[in-house]
């Protein structure tokens, strides 16, 4: 399990970039859904597709951030227990 955490949390800056990119796409998807409310319903379909992709990208980025933080806690408690 620690190998998986190391793989996911190896680059927290990249994970933050992914998370923020997904957040930006999420806002764009919401704009398309709102546009479809006032105009043609196909804009809402496009917005829902963008929202689903944005949620996946944000979740992947947040998973990397979470793995990095959890790994830091594990390493910190290991070094305290060894002393």
Image: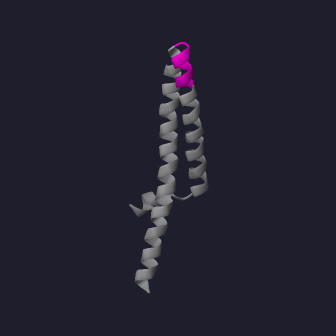
Residue 30 rendering spot, x and y as whole percentages: 54, 30
- Residue at 61% over, 48% down: 17
Residue 60 vertical position relative to residue 83 in the rendered view, above or below: above
Residue 48 vertical position relative to residue 68 in the rendered view, above or below: above
Residue 80 rendering spot, x and y as whole percentages: 44, 81
- Residue at 49% over, 27% down: 49
Residue 36 rendering spot, x and y as whole percentages: 53, 18
Q: Along the line of sight, which residue is nearer the eye, 82 or 31?
A: 31
Q: Main secondary structure of the magenta part?
A: helix
Q: Along the line of sight, which residue is nearer the eye, 19 or 8?
A: 19
- Residue at 48% over, 26% down: 48
In this picture, which residue range is highlighted in magenta? 32-40
Q: Is residue 39 magenta?
A: yes
Viewport quadrant of the N terminus: bottom left
Residue 81: quadrant of the picture: bottom left
Q: Residue furthest bottom?
A: 83
**Which colour style is shown?**
one colour
């Amino acid at each position: 399990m620690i190998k998986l955490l190391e793989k996911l949390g190896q680059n927290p800056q990249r994970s933050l970039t992914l998370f923020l990119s997904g957040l930006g796409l999420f806002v764009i998807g919401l704009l398309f859904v709102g546009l479809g409310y006032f105009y043609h319903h196909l804009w809402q379909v496009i917005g829902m597709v963008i929202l689903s992709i944005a949620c996946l990208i944000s979740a992947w980025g947040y998973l990397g951030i979470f793995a990095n933080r959890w790994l830091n806690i594990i390493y910190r408690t290991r070094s305290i227990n060894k002393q």
